[in-house]
Amino acid sequence: MEKKQQREQIVRFIIYFLILLPLMLQRDITPNNELKYLSIADEALRDGHFFTMYNHGEPYADKPPLYIWIVMFFKWLLGSHNTFILALFSLIPSFVTLAIFNRWCSGELGKKYMIAAELALMTTAYFIGSAIVLRMDMLMTMFITLAMYTFWRIYKGDDRRRLRILFPVYIFLAIFSKGPVGIMIPLLCIPPFLLVEGKIRSIERYWGWSTWLILALLCGGWWLGVWFEGGHDYLNNLLFHQTVNRAVDSFHHKAPFWYYAYTIWYAMGPWSLITIPVIIWALVKKMEMSSLVKFMLIVAASFLVTMSLISSKLAVYIMPIFTFLTYPAVILLQNCGKPRFAEGTRKVVTYCAATLLGVFLIAGFIIPRFNSRLGYKDVAHEALEVAQANSITRFGYYDLRSAENMDVFIGRSLEELSQEEFETPRTILAPNEGIIIFHKNENGVATFKAVK
């Protein structure tokens, strides 16, 4: 990319940041995942865990520790959780991912089409959503993108030793961010491309002994730390229960084979209505494609098939390939031989994307009105004030999902109450003792009652 284009790209990223800033600063975090990660980090800091994670005493081997380490570091550094700073570890990786694809496709996309592809991806439903939430999905997507771009540079003849080292390092960081998905795209999607290109015998250039050795050393160090801290049971949970069992017969997020055939339409919405038809049209018309376009489409197709065979499914799991669908679709549209149609369709994307970004800007200013439905921060702080005013030190909850993670706000553990205890709480109280009980009101919104 030219320096002028790079400067313009930085300006666009700053604009995206300013548009999303009010939403990042003013929204509450969701209890199911975001609040859970903060609670897990607090428990790790309190109990001195580093490689093994627990959620209220229960092993949490669902995710590798990299993102939790980030949460722990800033809690240690600042003394409290700063959700804005933590959100930057989703937003900045999204910018890095966009920048890599802009550079990667700069030789095949004109300036206007590149900006349109960037805007389309940035305003894709799950992409922009993942860019501001406290999750590890965008972090993994960035490392997968870095790994695949590094592969491409080696494939195109850049044999520098640094790239050969970075390729497995990026793969490990993708694994260390979210788990086995981090290795599935590089491992399962590169061979089909080499096969199509008639270069399958060159696989050793990328998946040779040095790649496996670096991965073995990095993963081995991680697993050794897990074994020292959590023992055989935790390591078995991490390596087998959370991988093999979820792949074969999932105990969590189980869905049929065709799940992604329909979820991709809303996960990539609204641009799936353009990108997917364009790709299908180009394939039906047997349109001539460059090696880069073939590579990206083969990566997307291979990963979709692989993920469809795995038992555990969520729409966000396929987010790493949104870039591998959006950018080649725009390249194909640009080269379709119908300039008037192509020009009109990019204009549409640009105007609609600008409108969607405006919606996110407005949402940032009105989100405080809906925070009571989104998360527990406001109700927890209100309950704390009541507890302090009435010298109440016990907290409990009844029929409220992930309410145990409110210990992040309250600073102490919460008791789960049965229906009988919720209806007659004084039976569990000592004389002159009180309790704050969180529960849902008739509208399904979290509230509380103080009993003394």
Image (cartoon, helix red, strand yellow):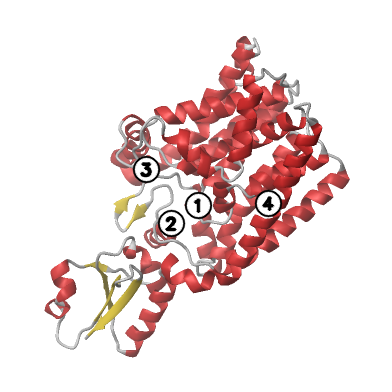
Residue at x 41%, y 78% (from the top left corner): 381
Residue 263 tag number: none
Label 4 amino acid?
Cys
Labels 2 and 1 touching (C-beta < 8 A) = yes
SS of the residue under disc 3 = helix
Mark 2 and mark 1 lie on one chain; the one further toward the N terminus is 2
Q: Is residue 147 above or below residue 138?
A: above
Q: Any mark on residue 135, and which?
A: 1
Q: Residue at x 70, y 46 (%)?
A: 349
Gap between marks 1 and 3, in whole Å?
A: 27 Å
Q: Nearer the viewer, mark 1 or mark 4?
A: 4
Instruction: Say which label, 4 or 3, has the lower sequence index.
Output: 3
Label 1 SS: loop
Among the two numbered marks 1 and 4 on one chain, the one whose residue lies closer to the N terminus: 1
Q: Amino acid at mark 1?
A: Arg
The amino acid at mark 3 is Phe
Which label was assigned to residue 352?
A: 4
Q: On the image, numbered disc 3 is attached to which residue?
A: 228
Asked if residue 174 can be seen in this view, the reply is: yes
Image depth: mark 3 or mark 2 in front: 2
First in sequence: mark 1 or mark 3?
1
- Give the secondary structure at mark 4: helix
Label disc, if present, on residue 37 of the rendered structure: 2
